[in-house]
Image (cartoon, rainbow, N blue to C red):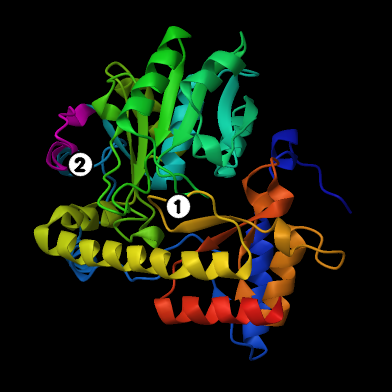
Amino acid sequence: MTKKVANRANAISPFHVMDILAQAKQLEAAGQDIIHMEVGEPDFETPQPIIEAGMNALKQGKTHYTPACGLPELREAIAGWYELQYQVKVNPERIIVTPGASGALLLVMGALLEQNEQVLLADPGYPCNKHFARFVEGRVKSIPVDADKQYQLTAQHIQQYWDNKTTMALVASPSNPTGTVLTQQELKELAAAVTSKSGHLVVDEIYHGLTYDGFHAPTALSVSDEVFVVNSFSKFFGMTGWRLGWLVVPEGYTEVMDKLAQNLFLAPTTMSQYAALAAFQSNTLEILEQRRQAFELRRNTLLPLLKDIGFSIPVTPQGAFYLYADCSALLNEQISDSMALSRFLLKQAGVAITPGLDFGHYQAETHCRFAYTTDEQRLIEAAERIRKIL
């Protein structure tokens, strides 16, 4: 018997990668060795200083609700991080601590998007963004982006695609799935273009800290105080399961975010917030820098191996931990698209990757994503398995 659910729920698609992951787990349970390159989660454990801070919080009985916008001392610590890392001063009152970056995105959409109003998004891009918009009865205009634009929205896109229903543009730097980064000039031009339309610019910066080749991604807060910036403790800080993120809002938006947070999730997890205070300690940052270097080595290891097999990767990612690859040269009558390729590699080579269908529609059938979230030897082995089977 079919149970009736709301249209908004039916309109939200599951991750294709979760199907790949479920199949991978079944194969592992049957005894097959699987190299996981499908899920965007660092393989490193949370740094020990953070774990110890969380345990100490529990031992001290810090298990009660915090203010809806987060612990004041954590908001101040995040503000200090912006000043240290970017030389940008942010009033701690503008910082809203959330249950992961997802909580931050839900607050943004709930506060800013009216029914049937439209958000501009890059295609390919992180799939949940369009679902957050749909959840609050908003709409999405996905804009096809190519390697020549670094797979990013530009000020020209804003001018071309903005209409009377559009109120928001959302970009990510570094991006998922492509790992490309917006420069300060590009952020400045985007902010100016959106401001000229009397709209809102939201910038997802959850992969900040994970950049390579000596490049440091600029925060959008360095070009405008009117942008909304989303960040997370999950990626660079390695706290995925702690479910903690934050949102920086322009002056005047704290009250509405506080009100929504009270109603949607009451407060972020208390233990996680106390643990996160240790994320900015010098001993923790030393660990995180070593891990950043490890990710850079992994990128440099995997990139030429995939190209040698026949994958086309026209843009070397400057951040995150993904390679977005054109697999069209490897497709044939038996392996007709990226989903078929993902299933084939999983079953025949024991390598799990993500099909492009998870990230949009534009050229999705001919692209796939590799997450270099396992060590170099496993990456080399994965590439060798793929080369042999293809």
Write the start and end of the magenta stretch as one range.
79-93
Residue shown at 64%/91% (left/top)? 31
Q: Nearer the viewer, mark 1 or mark 2?
A: 1
Q: Are marks 1 and 2 in contact (CB under 8 Å)?
A: no
Q: Which label sits on residue 181?
A: none
Query: Which of 356 and 58 lies nearest the eye of the viewer?
Result: 356
Q: Mark 1: which amino acid?
A: Thr
Residue shown at 47%/14% (left/top)? 199
**Along the horizontal axis of the image, is 388 left or right of 95?**
right
Residue shown at 56%/76% (left/top)? 383
Find residue 323 and report its horizontal and vertical position in percent. 51, 57
Q: Is 239 rendered above or below residue 85?
A: below
Quarter of the figure with residue 123: top right
Query: Which of 204 and 233 lies nearest the eye of the viewer?
Result: 204
What is the chief secondary structure element of the magenta stretch? helix
Quarter of the figure with residue 353: bottom right
Badge 2 crowding class, 10 Å Cα cut-off, few under 14, some 14 to 19, many 20 or more, is many
Query: Mark 1: which secondary structure?
Result: loop
Query: Mark 2: which secondary structure?
Result: helix
Q: Identify the mark nearer the N-term, 1 or 2.
A: 2
Identify residue for label 2: 78
CA gap, disc 1 to disc 2? 30 Å
Q: How many marks?
A: 2
Find residue 254 and report its horizontal and vertical position in percent. 30, 23
Identify residue for label 1: 316
Q: Is 174 rendered above or below residue 41?
A: above
Does residue 161 appear in the picture of this structure?
yes
Q: Mark 2: which amino acid?
A: Ile
